[in-house]
Image (spheres, rainbow, N blue to C red):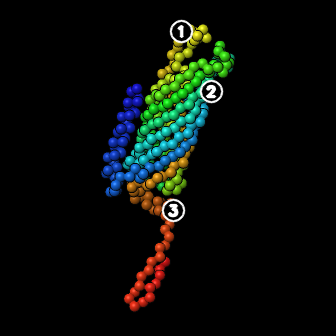
Amino acid sequence: MNIVRLAIAVICILIISSSINTSAQRKRGDFSLGEGLTITPKVGYNLFFGDLVDKSRGSISLGVVADREMSNFLSLRTQLIGGTMQGQQVFQTSGLVYAEFDNFYTEFTVGGAYKPLNHLLGYFRERRFQPYAHLNAGLVYFSATEYWGPASQGTPGEEWRSASGVSPVVTMGGGTSVWISPIVSLNFELTGSLAFSDQLDVHDVWYHTYEDWENKVNAQTTNPNDFYYTFTVGVSFMIDQSKFSNSSRYNRKSYIKTRHYYKTKNKRRSFKRPGQKKFLFF
C-alpha cells in the first residue's frame, strides 16, 4: 500500500504544480473546462502476468481517456478502460494445462501526464510526435472464474472457483500523440498496471493434491499482487484549444502546418464616397 500512497502523493504534486503554472503562464480569460481538453477513445490488447499464466495471456481492452492541459508540459488525465483477461497454467512435466481462467475487468484511474519535449524545447501544439509519460491511481473491478485443466485431477473445463471485487490499482507508462490536424491526432500508449489484489485470476492459493483441495488443507499462498500490461491505439479529438501560446521559435512552423485549416472566406464590404454611387468590394 506504500506504493499507492506514493503514487497519490506524486499525482497531487503534479496537480498543484500544474495549477500554479497555469495561473502564471496562461493568458487572461475565464476558466473553461473544454480548453486544452482532448477525448481519446481507444482499443487495445492486455497481457496478464499473474500467478495463473504460462501461456494464452492476451485479451482485448476498450477504453476512453480525457486529458486536459494544466500547464505547457503537464496535464490532468482520467481513464476508464475495461475488457476481458485470460490465461492458462501449464503442468511442467506433461505440458498440459493444469488450470485456466477468464476475467471481466473495469479500471478507473486519475493522474497526470508529462510532456518532456514541451518542457525542454518549448510548447508546440502542432509537434508531429509528442511523447509523454503518465502516472495514475484508482480502482479496478474484476469478476473472474478459474477452471480445471486436463493436467489436474479435476474435471477439465469444470469451474474450480470464482472471485469478484474492487481493488486499488496504480498504473504508469508512456505513449505518443501523432499530430494529424488541429482537431485530430493518433495516440499510441503502453501502460503497466499493478493491482493490489491476487484474485484477478482467482489463483491466490493452490494445493499440492486434489485431496488437499477437497479438504482445504495445506494451502500454498502465491505472490500478493497481480500485474498486467495494456497496449492501446486511439484517436484523440481536441474539444477546444488551450490558451497556451506556442513558443516563438515555432511560430513559422505552426503557421505553415495550420494555414490550410484556417482559411477564411472573404467577406463582402461596402462603402459610399460623398457624391458617388455605392461600390461593392470583395
Q: Is residue 161 placed above or below 115 in the rendered structure?
A: above
Disc 3 element: helix
List x then y, in percent, for residue 230.
54, 36
Q: Is residue 218 left or right of residue 71?
A: right
Q: Which residue is the site of mark 1?
A: 217
Q: Give the position of the N terminus as an image quadrant.
A: top left
Contact between labelled residues 1 and 3, with CB atoms less than 8 Å apart: no
Name the residue: 58% across, 10% down.
214
Q: Is residue 184 left or right of residue 272?
A: right
Q: Is residue 38 visible?
A: yes
Question: Looking at numbered disc 1 in the image, what kind of residue is underneath it?
Answer: Val
Answer with left or right where residue 1 lies relative to residue 186.
left
Element assignment for label 2: loop
Q: Position of residue 209 (x, y in %)?
A: 60, 10
Residue at 41% in and 45% down = 75
**Residue 231 image offset from top left, x and y in percent:** 55, 38
Gap between marks 2 and 1, in whole Å? 28 Å
Residue at x 41%, y 48% (from the top left corner): 69
Instruction: Name above or below for residue 277 compared with residue 117.
Output: below
Label 3 vs label 2, nearer the camera = 3
Please tell me in which quadrant of the rendered image residue 16 appears: top left
Q: Write down the residue under mark 2.
A: 55
* Secondary element at image label 1: loop
Residue shown at 45% from the left, 32% from the top:
139
Instruction: Name the residue that disc number 3 marks.
Output: 261
Nearer the observer, 268 or 121: 268
